[in-house]
Amino acid sequence: MNRTTLSLLAAVTSLAAVTGFAALTAPDGGTAAEATAPARLPVERSSLLCPAPATSDLAETVYTSYTPPSGAGGGSAASSGGSTAELRPSVATLRGPADDAGKAGEEKKDGKDEAEEDGSAKKPPSDKPVVSLKQPGKPVGAKASGSAAPALVGTATGSLAPGWTTQQTTTVSAGSGRGVLGVNCTAPDTDLWFPGASIAKDRQDYVHLTNPDDTGALVDIELYGKDGALKSQLSDGIQVPAGASVPVLLSTLTADPAEDVTVHVTTRTGRVGAAVRAAGDETGSDWLPASADPAGTLVLPGIPADATAVRLVAFAPGDDDAELKVRLASATGTINPAGAESLRVKSGMTASLDMKDVTKGEAGSLLLSPAEGAPASPVVAALQVTRGKGDKQEIAYIPATAPVTERATAADNRAKGSLLSLTAPGETAQVKVTASAGTEGGAQAVKTYTVKGGTTLAVSPPVPAGLKGSYALTVEPQSGGPVHAARTLLLPEDGIQMFTVQTLPDDRGLVAVPAAQQDLSVLGD
C-alpha cells in the first residue's frame, strides 16, 4: 500500500477513535460537497486533571462535577448507559526537581524513591474515586479537608464525555496561602503558557504538573521576565511519572528575581495538565490557569466591578514585537482606559501594565488588539485582579480565553455569590444560560440574555428553584457575534473579599469529523 493511502487511512482511523464514528462514503444520492462537509459529533472520551488543592491544614476543598445533557436548555438528561466519569487520586504527589528545601530529586519514603526507575509510581493508599458522575444533567459534589488531598486524574466515556466539567474550589481561612482558590480541572496538553506568575520575594508560586497516562512524561519549563529568558536551573527534562503529580517551586529554578514572569510548559514526551498556584504574603492566593493560545487579538473577560487594582501581564512568543491597543468593554460600551491605552511587548519578553481600578465600579472585560497600523503579532496574556485593600485584599487571575463556540460550563455555583460575565467584543449576541439542578436537589432554570456588541453584561445568573447544594451554569450562544464568558465566585470571610474567577472556554464536547470523498474500502495495495 502506498504512503498516501496509509496516511489517509491513519487520519480517518484517528478521527473515528475520537468520536466513535466516521462516515467514509457519501450518502446515497449525496453530492460531493455534502460528502466533504464536516459533521459535528459528540466526543466519546474526555480526560480531566485536578491539581493538589492546598498545602494548608485549614484547607477545605469542594469538587463539583457535571456533564450537560444534549440540548442543555431543556428536556430530560440522556441515559448514561454504560458510561463512566470518575476522578481518582493520582498515584503519588512527588517533590519536583527542586523542592522548597532546595534539594533535587523526588520525595523518598523509607529510603526508597517514590518514583520508580521506569517512570511509573507507586499505588496510592486508596484508588477509590473522589468524584463519580452518574448521569448527564445532574451534578455531583465531593469534599476534602486539609493538606493531604491529592491531585486527581479522571476519564469520562460515552454520554458523560461531551462537555464534562469539574470545578475545584478551596477555601483557606488563614495563613500566607489564605483565600479562595478556584480552578477548572483541565485536559492534558503538550504546550502551555502562564503569563502573570512571579518569583518576587513575597511570592511562593508553584507550577503543578499532573500526568494522566500510563507512561512517564518529560517536561521542560522556561521562565521569561521583562528582559527575556531567565537563566534556569533544573528546568529541563523534569520527569513526571505515570499517573503522578509534581509541584515545582518556580523560585528554585532560577537565581534571577522577577516580579512578572511568563511560564512556558512543554513536553518532550507524553502530556500533562498544568496550573500555577500563586500565593503572596499579603495578597492571598489563587490558581493561574493557562492563557489561550498565542494570538494577535485576545479577550480577558470578567473583571469585577469593585476591583481595586488590575495588572495586565503579556508575553510575545514570536519573532516580532507586539504593539497592543488596550480597551475596556464595559456595560455601556468600549472605552480606551485613561493612562493605559496601549502596551508594547517586545519579542521574547514579559511586559506589564498597571491599570489600577480600571473598572471604576462597573464590571468589564479587557480587549487586546494590534495598535493602529501595527501587525497582528501573537501574544499570551493574563490579568491579576485585586479586591479589597491592605490586609483585607485578595487576588484572582483572569487569563485570555477563547470564545464559547458551542457550549461552556461553570460547575460550582452557590445560591449567593455567583456572578456571570458575558462579553461580545464584536456584534451583538444572544446567549442562553441554563442552571442545572443542585447536587442535593432543585429544578433546572433557563434564561436568555442579549449582550450588545462591544459590551460586557454582568448578571446574577439564574438559580434553580428549591436549590440544595451547588449547581452548574451552562452557557450556549444562540445568535450574533462571538461571546467570551467568565464566572466569579464571591466567598467573603472575616471582612476579606475572598473570590475567584474562572473563564469559560468552549467545552469541546463536539468535534468536526470530515467525511471522506471516496470509499476507502476499494483502495488496493
Image: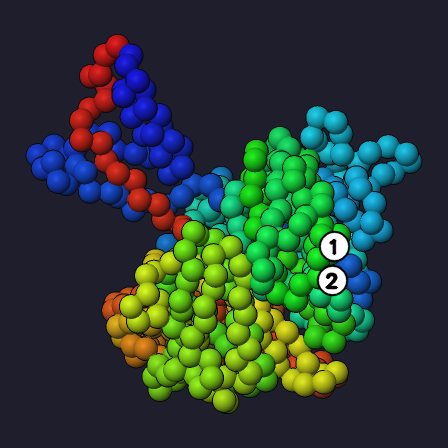
Q: Residue 285: x percent and y percent?
A: 69, 68
Q: Is residue 131 visible?
A: no
Q: Name the front one of labels 2 and 1.
A: 1
Quadrant of res 175 = bottom right
- Which numbered tag is attached to residue 128? none
Q: Which residue is mark 1?
A: 255
Q: Residue furthest top?
A: 525
What residue do we see at 73% from left, 34% from top? 121
Q: Please name the amino acid that badge 1 sits on.
A: Ala
Is 118 positioned to the left or the right of 476 in the image? right
Measured as percent of width and height from the top left, residue 262 is found at 58, 58
Front residue of 164 and 197: 197
* Among the 4 quarters of the image, the one containing residue 58: bottom right
User: Could you classify mark 2 by the number of other residues whose Cα lies within 10 Å: few (under 14), some (14-19), or many (20 or more)?
Assistant: many
Task: Give the mark nearest the N terminus, 2 or 1.
Answer: 2
Q: Nearer the viewer, residue 220 or 299?
A: 220
- Tell me the residue at 56%/35% (across/down): 268
Residue drawn at x 27%, y 75% is 428
Q: Amino acid at mark 2?
A: Gln
The residue singled out by tag 2 in the image is 204
Residue nearer the viewer, 146 or 4? 4
Q: Secondary structure at mark 2?
A: loop
What element does badge 1 sit on?
loop
